[in-house]
Amino acid sequence: MSGEQPDAVPQATVNEFSILNSFWFALGAFMQQGCDISPRSISGRIVGSVWWFFTLILISSYTANLAAFLTVERMVTPINSPEDLASQTEVQYGTLMHGSTWDFFRKSQISLYSRMWEYMNSRKQVFVKTYDEGIRRVRTSKGKYALLIESPKNDYTNEREPCDTMKVGRNLDAKGFGIATPLGSPLR
């Protein structure tokens, strides 16, 4: 036993913030575990508290976003363009009877829109008499009816409660809107 050295006595944990201890403190805070050392000065405690609060918010936000991502059903629209709408048979589509959109499809020289007009004209039940009737039909059809309307009316409807409709794809055509006033009116 004379040649053996006694077992090394472990050094006691020292409450000083060396580079290694500071890293260990930051990692313990980030993992929400803590560590054996803690800051002694007021400024160190403030910095430590801010770091703990930051990591708490960061991890809570990450957890909430992850839970929302995994549980919320993503809205996937099978129709993203007039081509998609015309090439399928599951979703019926129509317009306001005798409105400007109805007239656009009726007079169109574009083959896609002419084909859509033929589809709608052969199924008179897809036309609606009022916007309210058409919007009600969209809401009650469970995705089986699409109403083709002017974009300002569509945008207005989509922004109103109960926020259960949406615009799909791009505008079909561009038209200007104007407001008529009497000659010399102060509204111009």
Image (cartoon, rainbow, N blue to C red):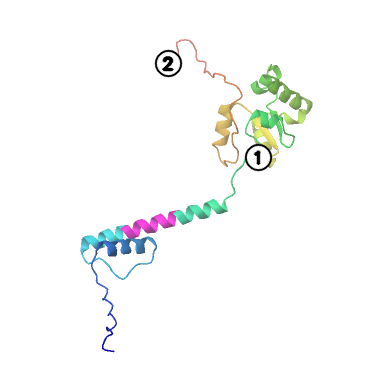
Give the side of residue 80 with respect to residue 10, left or right.
Answer: right
Residue nearer the viewer, 54 or 178: 54
Residue nearer the viewer, 53 or 93: 53
Location of residue 99 (image quadrant): top right
Q: CA distance from mark 2 to mark 1?
A: 41 Å
Location of residue 16 (image quadrant): bottom left
Whole-percent x and y of residue 142?
68, 42
Residue at image point 28% right, 77% down:
10
Q: Residue furthest top?
A: 183
> Which class describes the residues within 10 Å of circle 2: few (<14), some (14-19), or many (20+)?
few
Give the side of residue 152 with respect to residue 85, left or right.
Answer: left
**Secondary structure category for the residue under label 1:** helix
The boundaries of the magenta stretch are 51-61
Residue nearer the viewer, 84 or 132: 84
Characterize the magenta stretch by its predominant secondary structure. helix
Whole-percent x and y of residue 135?
65, 35
Question: Looking at the rendered structure, which numbered label has been put on residue 139?
Answer: 1
Q: Is residue 58 magenta?
A: yes
Question: Looking at the rendered structure, which numbered label has been put on residue 186?
Answer: 2
Whole-percent x and y of residue 1?
29, 89
**Where 67 sits versus 77, above or below?**
below
Residue at image point 59% right, 46% down:
74
Residue type at mark 1: give it: Arg
Q: Residue furthest front?
A: 3
Q: Is residue 182 magenta?
A: no
Residue at image point 63% right, 30% down:
81
**Where 113 sits versus 46, above or below?**
above
Residue type at mark 2: give it: Pro
Residue at image point 66% right, 20% down:
104
Whole-percent x and y of residue 34?
35, 67
Give the side of residue 175 with respect to residue 95, left or right.
Answer: left
